[in-house]
Image (cartoon, rainbow, N blue to C red):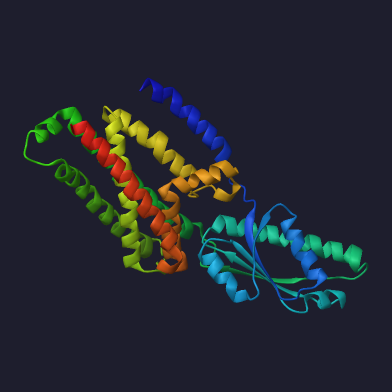
Amino acid sequence: MLALSFLAPVIQLVVLAYAASLDVRIIPMAVCDQDRTAISREFTGGFFHSGYFREAAWVDAAQEIDPLINSGKISVGLVIPPGFGKDILAGRQPLLQVIADGADANSAGIGLSYVTQIINRRMIEYQKGVLEGWLVRIDSRPRVWYNPSLKSRNFMVPGVLAMLLMVMTMILTSLGVVKERESGTMDQLLVTPIKPWQLIIGKLAPFTVIGVIDITLVIIVATAWFGVPINGSVSLLYGLSLLFILNTLGLGLLISTVSRNQQQAMMTAIFFIMMPMIILTGFVFPIENMPKVIQWSTYLLPLRYYFVVVRGLFLKGVGMAELWPQALAMLAFGVGILSLSVFRFRRNLE
């Protein structure tokens, strides 16, 4: 407890100072330049030189932007139609389409404001430079997909499902096992004919059922009370949620093997697992704004992949074709974590 009391705050301070930022920068953008002129290239360059956007993809057709948004590779798409440069040189009002991923309402709103600022800046440059004395106006038509009203509730409620699953299954598992060790009932179980694997299944099965019930309750409240739709498959949501529960049960069992009492188990779970996952997995703070080292470390956290799953199924209606990388990652982490936990648990029993 003494080590936890001094070590945990230092680690949390370092992580929070680098990762906790509500600023939205380096937004991944895809460009569909159908004009292919010097003016259109110069125009798109203004986005990438602004420091707000990152060049993520170039596509030939506007239809190719949709799969990129579904997969999470981009957050904003820019479509420049043919004749964009000619309209500017002729003093006509050119058209421009901006597509934003509304699944993250905060990032989408800030990203659209950045787009508007850059367009206005380019208009002023055209008026003062290339077309001095002319009035050039660009008709930009933004489209927000998957959350047109940009309600933050639609973004947060699916994330709450992930947080509840993590807290309920991981905390209850770790506290339940440690409590039995403290009360001495674990020693009584060891003298019975129960085998270690049967004991482990008996400890994990109830919390799996609790997790499934929590999923059902959250779905009912989210859809009936808050009006957040589920555009994807409900059965796929349950299936991938079970993969995530496999990770949280393993983490809970692992915590119980390194904790001597319930207080240690609670502090270990909160400070070393829950807090880093909340901060580093995109629940509140955009991952793209974090330092590269921290961004790479987020790939080791199962909650990052589950956030993509729940928000994709709730808001985007994606299927297994888009979510298989997340499913594979959660399966790999779940098997690895649970295997390590079972090994340590059996060692403690012996």
Q: Is 256 left or right of 270, judged from the image as shown?
A: left
Q: Residue at x 56, y 66 (%)?
A: 68
Rendering quarter of residue 174: top left
Residue 32 % position (x, y): 67, 71
Q: Residue furthest right?
A: 133
How many marks can you see? 0
State left or right for residue 272 relative to residue 105. left
Q: Quadrant of the N terminus?
A: top left
Q: Is residue 220 visible?
A: no
Which residue: 30% across, 31% down? 258
Asked which quadrant contains residue 291, the reply is: top right
Instruction: Tell me the residue at 42%/49% (across/down).
Output: 303
Q: Name the quadrant of the C terminus.
A: top left
Relative to 57, say whether 275 is above or below. above
Q: Position of residue 227 (x, y in %)?
A: 41, 65
Specify whether 259 is left or right of 160: left
Residue 46 in view (yes/no): yes
Spot occupied by residue 180 in the image (x, y as percentages of width and height)? 18, 33
From what the image shows, is residue 147 above or below residue 276? below
The x, y position of residue 112, in whole percent, is 65, 61
Q: Residue at x 66, y 56 (%)?
A: 54
Q: Nearer the viewer, residue 176 or 189?
A: 189
Nearest to the observer: residue 251 or residue 197:
197
Which image quadrant is residue 141 in?
bottom right
Residue 270 vs residue 17: left or right?
left
